[in-house]
């Protein structure tokens, strides 16, 4: 029985000529897959900009209720937070970009206070898949958080939003208990906090008694 050397086997001899074509096809498949994966979170969103936003159920601790301007702890809903603008941040303890972005998110919360916007704009974090213990670990890791971080261990809120990637930041208007999505940013928050706030304020309806939205100093 005659044995062929590997170099004499035609498929191996033809491979160098086919390699550019194979690499080109592989690159095309990889690119298509990456575009598909990038598009999936957007298709999964419950709302597009300027559309209605789900009124998520929240169960607040006394500390979180106080941070959101509510008188008592317990079950409530997103629309009952007393603010014209809401920033809803999805994070998770097991999400590296969520930890990486936190200094800038904390700076954003600080600028809201410094510009006198704390009663007009409130921020609430949803800890996707995290229980109270993981929320506490997240908070301690960052030396405390200047906003409410609410556990979502059963992913109830996350699923209502279409299971988006984390981190994700939603900017909402809250007028008369009606939530509208103004913008959504998926992935690590890298914007300048003041530039982001300026854009958010321009998108918000004018407060009662004002012809134009306040810019906030």
Image (cartoon, grey):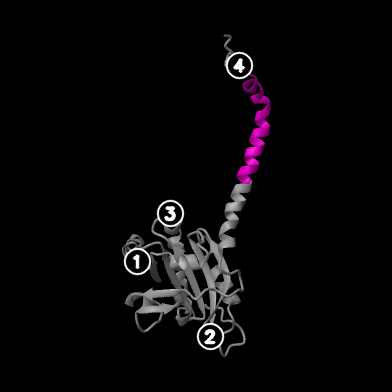
Which mark is in front, 3 or 4?
4
How far apart are the alpha carbons under marks 3 and 1?
17 Å
Query: Does the stretch in magenta take in 103?
Result: no
Secondary structure at numbered mark 4: helix
> Given contact means CB atoms under 8 Å apart, are the residues at marks 2 and 1 in contact?
no
**Which sits earlier in the primary sequence, circle 1 or circle 4?**
4
* Label 2: few (<14), some (14–19) or many (≥20) C-alpha neighbours in 10 Å: few
Q: Residues within 10 Å of mark 4 (few under 14, many from 20)?
A: few
Of pointers 3 and 4, the one earlier in the residue sequence: 4
Indicate the quadrant where residue 150 lies: bottom left
Q: Which mark is residue 176?
A: 2
Please give the range of residues in magenta.
9-31
Q: Which mark is residue 96?
A: 3
* Nearer the camera: disc 3 or disc 1: 3
**Dominant secondary-structure state across the stretch colored magenta:** helix
Q: Is residue 17 left or right of residue 78?
A: right
Q: Are marks 1 and 4 in contact (CB under 8 Å)?
A: no
Residue identifier under label 4: 7
* Residue at horizontal 42 percent and vertical 58 percent from the top: 99
């Amino acid at each position: 029985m005659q044995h062929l050397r590997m170099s004499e086997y035609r498929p191996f001899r033809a491979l160098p000529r086919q390699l550019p074509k194979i690499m080109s096809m592989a690159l095309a498949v990889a690119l298509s897959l990456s575009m598909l994966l990038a598009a999936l979170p957007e298709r999964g969103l419950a709302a597009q900009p300027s559309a209605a936003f789900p009124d998520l159920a929240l169960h607040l601790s006394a500390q979180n209720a106080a941070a959101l301007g509510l008188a008592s702890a317990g079950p409530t809903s997103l629309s009952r937070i007393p603010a014209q603008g809401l920033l809803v941040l999805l994070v998770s303890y097991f999400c590296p970009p969520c930890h990486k972005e936190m200094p800038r998110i904390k700076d954003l919360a600080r600028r809201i206070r410094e510009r006198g916007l704390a009663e007009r704009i409130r921020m609430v974090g949803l800890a996707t898949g995290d229980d109270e213990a993981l929320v506490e670990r997240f908070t301690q890791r960052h030396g405390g958080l200047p906003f409410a971080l609410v556990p979502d261990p059963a992913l109830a809120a996350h699923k209502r939003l279409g299971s988006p990637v984390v981190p994700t930041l939603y900017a909402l208007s809250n007028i008369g208990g009606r939530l509208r999505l103004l913008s959504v940013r998926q992935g690590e928050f890298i914007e300048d906090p003041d530039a982001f706030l300026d854009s958010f304020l321009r998108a918000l309806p004018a407060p009662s008694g004002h012809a134009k939205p306040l810019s906030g100093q």
